[in-house]
Image (tube, rainbow, N blue to C red):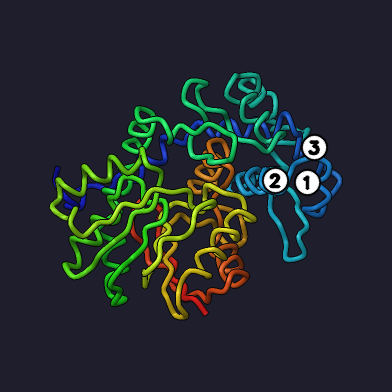
Amino acid sequence: MACFNPPSNDPTPFFDLVRGNLATELLASGVIHFDVPGRLTKGPKSSAQLQSELGLADRAWVVLSTALKAMNILEEDFHGNISLTPAGAEFLTDGEFDMKSYIGLIAETPGVHALLGRLKNNAPTANRDDEGDAFIFREGKASAMDSENSARRLTLALSGRARICGSAVAKALVGAGCKRILDVGGGSGLYAIALLLADENLRVTVWDRAEVLRLAAEFGAKCGVAHRMDLVSGDMFADPVPEGHDGVLLSNILHDWDIPECERLLKKLRDSVEVRTPLWIHDVYLNDSLDGPLPIALYSAALFSLTEGRAYSTAEYRTMLRHCGFLDQPAVLPTAVHCGVLTARAV
């Protein structure tokens, strides 16, 4: 395998197309089934009031409302009051140019009803019965990542983004002067490999489920870095954090979990490292105003559908970090396919 030659073309449009169906499903759910425009025809309502009327949990409400704002249907002022945009008022309420009936043509499709159910239940879609639930590790709950075949299939499916982003992530991290980095939930090991190729004096520990690490071992051997890549099997919530690291990487990990679980993991990591140890969050980021961008709002809905998480804004991550004993640095360094690196240090 070629080890981290950057692509010649921008793959971002293809990633966006994978999530394109969610735009249709969110639009139909919000406009037809939840009738959000109809609830606002008499004027603005607070975000809390509208959420209460819809009966949605916080995570589901953020996913839906962010998407509707990114679609230019809703807008929110500094006081948290939500109203229709001029376009939303013109095209999605009773009037000369009302489009609700047109949107209603796709409102009863299976995909729309599936997303509607997930929003109402605030729960991801179950994976196939023979494999368990992908990405969700709960005591007493079967996980697809504990089955050799499904773990390999899912890890390979997710490795494409790591190949694309790996060299840029390495460039953002190797200047920190670390000697041993812990890659939490490192999956295929491709981010670890990128780091090892960028710094010949570095060691990286990949901490993940046993079946997932089989693939990391293969990739490490093919790229000639297996002798500097330690593979530690474990559950990041249940097992002790591997010791002896002076840097911690969380690449596309926290978005799989709701805020309480994110903070639980961050606090656990903080307790395991020395003061000033860097922690890097490599992820996508919603606007701090939670009104887009639309591609990230759709990705957030995809995460909502497959995991117990969603996409977060940099402001949300910074709040989590401060709650858990880290101080963030202001700049987010872009990598690829909407991702970037947010750096924090233990205090």
Classify 10 Å Cα crowding around label 1: few (below 14), some (14-19), many (20 and above): some
Marks 3/2: CA–CA distance: 17 Å
Q: Residues within 10 Å of mark 2 (few under 14, many from 20)?
A: many
Q: Which residue is mark 1?
A: 51
Q: Which mark is residue 38?
A: 3
Closest to the observer, 48 or 275:
275
- x, y percent for residue 207: 38, 53
Measure the alpha-carbon separation of dots 1 and 3: 14 Å
Residue that label 2 marks: 61
Secondary element under disc 1, as helix, strand or loop, is helix
Q: Amino acid at mark 3?
A: Gly
Q: Of all residues shown, which one is farthest toward the right?
A: 42
- Residue drawn where x is 26% and y is 48% of the image: 163
Mark 1 or mark 3: which comes first in sequence? 3
**Kind of residue indicated by mark 2:** Trp
Vertical comparison of 328 with 16: above or below: below
Left or right: 99, with 341 as reference point: right
Q: Nearer the viewer, mark 3 or mark 2?
A: 2
Q: Residue 270 at x, y = what percent?
A: 52, 69
Quarter of the image with the N terminus is: top left
Position above or below: 222 against 268 = above
Q: Secondary structure at mark 2?
A: helix
Amino acid identity at mark 1: Gln
Q: Do we see residue 30 in this rendering?
A: no
Q: Nearer the viewer, residue 180 or 313?
A: 180
Q: Secondary structure at mark 3?
A: helix
Of label 2 and label 1, which has the lower sequence position? Answer: 1
Quarter of the figure with residue 217: top left
Give the residue displayed 37% in from the left and 42% down from the top: 210
Q: Are marks 2 and 1 in contact (CB under 8 Å)?
A: yes
Q: In the picture provided, is 232 more to the left or to the right than 21?
A: left
